[in-house]
Amino acid sequence: MAKSLANFDAKLSSVYQSALESGELIFTASETVKSTETEYEVDCEICYAPALARKPQGVLPVVEADPNPKVTSAPTTSGDLHTAMPSTPVKKRIEKTNPFLPHSPALYVTDIGEEHKVLLNKFCIVPRHFLVVTKEFHPQTEPLSPQDMLAVWSCLNAVKDSRNALAFYNCGSRSGASQPHKHMQVIPLETPSPISILVRETSMRRPGKKENRPGDIISVPFNCINHVYLLPDPAQSDKDEEEILIEAYISLMDAMMTSIREYADQESLSDEEKSLCANGMSSFAYNWILTKEFMMIVPRKQASSDPVDGVSLDVNSLGFACMVLAKTPEVLTMVQKKGVINTVSETGFCFLREYYSPEKEQQRKEQQAILEKQMAGAFSGL
Ligand code: AMP
């Protein structure tokens, strides 16, 4: 069972306020630029925060055990919602490689059970953005454990407007993670995130399409492999929260591996991509998003979008929530021209022959079912 966190939201607010006032937490204001580009007319969000571009980028510690680590060592023009570093000297930053062990006492909110603690994000763009961190060191490349998911789930349930809150995990450095110590993240939101609206729209009944049910796996209309598990309401389910979360996660991992195998089978794939798929089967980089309504997984091919005139966007889980950060006017213009969804999709696995879409996926499943029926009929006649 998930722990119930009494007074969590009030504690979060008071620690946030004190840390902000004492200067231990740095909030960067941003302008939100809307971009309507989905077939359901959902607004994607580009947070424009030029103040972050003026801050020097740090040397990011390599995520341990990742065969394809991302090392950012120089200032870039790209945007990344969660790699903003403080302007302390680089040497000091390298020495202090783990900001979560020990953590800054001013950012500590509470423990969750034996294994996790909640810390505020020291460099936030969304107020009260917090991290659910393992108390002991675990690598950020590890899969989520049932305890990890339950800890995040109890936080989601404990924040104000919990239906809108978004939890995420950047697994592996190609996924946008910048810290090697295992940390999930939660952003409390007052209104639904674009991805929540998109999942609701995609799963709704439409002419020629049934409404999706809890337990179904769907894909949202990105140009890359993605899988979304629609969660049942635990109060209406005969399963407990732990069983629900485990079942969702395992089903999504399974769906992701099947899709990657299909992707790797494409004839026109380059050798580089084939080896990426082969290596990746054992240690995949992926983004994971959890809300009270769904769990989503997106396998990652690369950390940043394809550059246009040297300008690219670093993407983490929030990219697939259709919320990206542009730190320079060049990045803002590039993302506006290309579109948020096209830009973030470049960092996932896009089928070469045709774009991945729920309709095409449905057609493929139907053709497969017809084929299997025909084959079963043919065999029964033998
Ligand atoms: P990611 O970049 O996705 O791996 O997330 C790491 C998060 O840790 C980012 O949101 C950073 O802003 C945040 N962070 C970095 N240093 C600290 C620190 N000393 N205390 C708390 N949060 C931090």
Image (cartoon, rainbow, N blue to C red):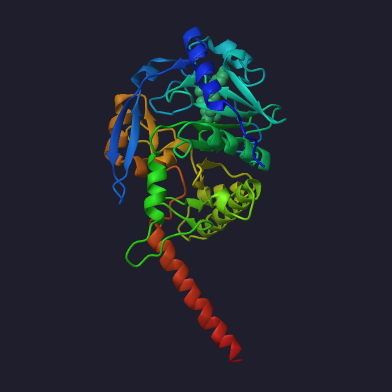
- Ligand 1 quarter of the rendering: top right
Residue 192, placed above or below residue 130: below
Query: Most extreme residue toward the bottom, as rendered?
Result: 381
Question: How many numbered circles does the render carry?
Answer: 0
Residue placed at 34% from the left, 32% from the top? Answer: 46
Identify which residue is drawn at 44% across, 54% down: 219
Estimate the x, y position of residue 221 in percent, counting from the top left.
Answer: 38, 52
Residue 284: image location, x then y, percent = 59, 45
Say whether residue 63 is left or right of residue 43: right
* Residue 72 at least partly seen: no
From the viewer's perspective, is residue 31 above or below residue 229? above
Q: Is residue 139 above or below residue 292?
A: above
In the image, 28 versus 147, the foreground residue is: 147
Q: Quadrant of residue 161?
A: top left
Quadrant position of the C terminus in the picture:
bottom right
Quadrant location of the N terminus in the rendered image: top right
Left/right of residue 10 with respect to residue 1 in the rendered view: left
Displayed quadrant of residue 6:
top right
Image: 86 above or below 216:
above
From the top left corner, tell me how far across and down residue 107 is, in percent: 57, 17
- Residue 307 visible in the shown view: yes
Question: Residue 109, image x and y in percent?
Answer: 59, 21
Which of the 4 quarters of the picture holds residue 5?
top right
Q: Image check: 350 left or right of 260? A: left
Q: Nearer the viewer, residue 6 or 360?
A: 6
Name the foreground residue: 75 vs 29. Answer: 29
At x 48%, y 27%, the residue is 82
